[in-house]
Image: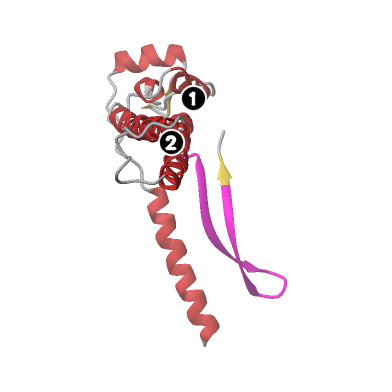
Amino acid sequence: MKNKLFIFLFLSICFSLSALAQEKEPKEEVTKETKKQLAEEGIVIDGEISTREPIDPLTPARAAFYSAVLPGLGHIHLKQYWKVPVIYAGLGAGMYFYLDNQKEYNRYRDAYKRRLAGFTDDEFYDTITDDGLEEAQSTLRRNKELSLLITAGIYILNIVWANVDAHLLQFNVDENLTFMPHYKINEFDNTGDLGLTLNFKF
């Protein structure tokens, strides 16, 4: 009983998927003159105009190269303009924190150097000890290096992002490429076989 119920459910899903896969977009109306002109160029197939964009295998590499030369340029090449401010916001934040930590690090380092030279007029003399100045320098140096690392990571991410987006823009969703489940009766032992079918039409 469970096997019959499972087979029934599986067949229902298969028929639903097949029906969805076979739905076609409405055909574009083509005049006789246009059909004749396109037929000479070999573009008309069964009375339909082929609107598929040609795949350029170099587009991902080109987008990555542009982004490496100038962050965001790869997305401009792909006409994804809204991603450029996101990239520059990330790079700008990373650089801001790097410069801010560098500035603070220089303050504490200069004060520490004056202490070692015997001066008692640095801005932290009454509030921070010598050990405190050393610890502050260590913390700010670590933060500075982390900020620089994050900025470099955003720069690399910008290149990878442009490359992946270029690949996805050329992803094949053509009806000639189908992947669907199927159910077949085995004629030798009269049992059902479940499977998946991959069809690719040239």
**Mainly helix, strand or loop, the magenta region?**
strand
**Disc nearer the start of the sequence (2/1):** 1
Circle 2 crowding by C-alpha within 10 Å: few under 14, some 14–19, many from 20: many
Using the image, determine if residue 36 lies above or below residue 122: above
Q: Residue at x 52, y 81 (%)?
A: 4
**Viewer-proximal residue among 128 and 189:** 128
Q: Residue at x 44, y 23 (%)?
A: 67
Q: Which quadrant of the figure has residue 147? A: top left
Taking the magenta stretch, the answer to whether it contains residue 152 is no
Secondary structure type for disc 1: helix
Q: Which mark is residue 144?
A: 2
| Quadrant the C terminus occupies | top right
Q: Residue at x 29, y 35 (%)?
A: 123
Taking the magenta stretch, the answer to whether it contains residue 183 is yes
**Viewer-proximal residue among 169 and 82:** 82
Q: Residue at x 41, y 30 (%)?
A: 114
Amino acid type, callout 2: Lys
Front position among marks 2 and 1: 2
List x then y, in percent, for residue 151. 42, 33
Q: Which residues are magenta?
A: 172-198
Residue at mark 1: 64
Could you tell whether 146 is left or right of 194 in the image?
A: left
Amino acid type, callout 1: Ala
List x then y, in percent, for residue 161. 44, 34
